[in-house]
């Protein structure tokens, strides 16, 4: 493996708190990466400001300017590939991606989802966990495939659901864990320890279970 930092492109749609966690890891030397660009599908979001503050190139590919999901994904792919990334990181990127796009980056694209997948794919995960009476909730970093929130899990972190938790307080608990496990998954990938093979996540040469590497519950 090359000693040069791994080139990463990060896709965002909003405030970019997970992006900031990864930027911090790059800057403090804990992540052997170079964020080559941050691309947003929405203009004027805080995540773009975070990237600019860190002197990282930014671009906007506004999905509202395209007539179809396919034409948007094609333009986004062109913008990403300008930077020749070895990994694409979805950090709060709120778009459903087409199969052609996910196939192009198969095994080289990670996403973070605020639930213990396969539970609660899609939106409103915190309220859904509370409504279901769950005692444990959490977050998953997974490889991206054509199935929405369905790619193989690399790592999960659990949090406890207290009787007085709301969707907002639970989201805050989960976000703390997001900022731990997403940089960790990126680090593993950059170090050549994490990869996807035959729709299975592997870490250190061993196939991971469906939940990925699991961090136990935190209150």
Image (spheres, rainbow, N blue to C red):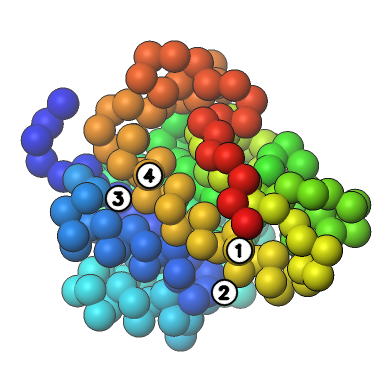
Q: Which residue is mark 2?
A: 65
Q: Which residue is mark 3?
A: 8
**Within-10-Å neighbours for mark 3: few <14, some 14–19, many 20+:** many
Q: Which residue is mark 4?
A: 184
Please provide percent x and percent y for residue 109: 45, 41
Which quarter of the figure is the C terminus placed in?
bottom right
Q: Which residue is mark 1?
A: 173
User: In this view of the protein, which residue sits in the foreground, 212 or 150?
Assistant: 212
Q: Residue at x 32, y 26 (%)?
A: 193
Tell me, yes or no, if residue 46 can be seen here.
Answer: yes
Which residue is outermost to the bottom?
44
- Give the numbered dot on residue 133: none
Q: CA distance from mark 3 to mark 1?
A: 27 Å
Please provide percent x and percent y for residue 126: 75, 61
Q: Give whichever of discs 2 and 4 has the lower sequence position.
A: 2
Q: Give whichever of discs 2 and 1 has the lower sequence position.
A: 2
**Within-10-Å neighbours for mark 4: few <14, some 14–19, many 20+:** some
Q: Quadrant of residue 161?
A: bottom right
Compared with 128, 191 (above or below) is above
Q: Give whichever of discs 3 and 1 has the lower sequence position.
A: 3
């Amino acid at each position: 493996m090359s000693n040069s930092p791994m080139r990463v492109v990060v896709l965002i749609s909003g405030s970019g708190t997970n992006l900031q966690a990864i930027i911090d890891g790059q800057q403090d030397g804990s992540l052997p990466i170079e964020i080559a660009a941050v691309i947003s599908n929405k203009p004027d979001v805080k995540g773009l400001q975070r990237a600019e503050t860190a002197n990282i190139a930014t671009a906007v590919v506004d999905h509202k300017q395209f007539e179809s999901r396919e034409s948007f994904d094609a333009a986004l792919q062109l913008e990403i590939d300008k930077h020749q990334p070895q990994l694409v990181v979805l950090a709060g990127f709120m778009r459903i991606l087409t199969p052609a796009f996910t196939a192009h980056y198969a095994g080289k694209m990670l996403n973070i989802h605020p639930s213990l997948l396969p539970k609660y794919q899609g939106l409103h995960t915190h309220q859904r966990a509370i409504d279901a009476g769950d005692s444990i909730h959490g977050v998953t970093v997974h490889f991206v495939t054509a199935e929405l929130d369905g790619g193989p899990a690399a790592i999960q972190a659990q949090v406890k659901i207290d009787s007085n938790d709301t969707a907002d307080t639970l989201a805050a608990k989960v976000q703390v864990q997001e900022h731990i496990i997403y940089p960790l998954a990126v680090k593993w990938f950059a170090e050549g320890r994490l990869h996807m093979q035959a729709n299975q996540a592997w870490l250190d040469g061993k196939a991971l279970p469906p939940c990925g590497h699991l961090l136990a519950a935190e209150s």
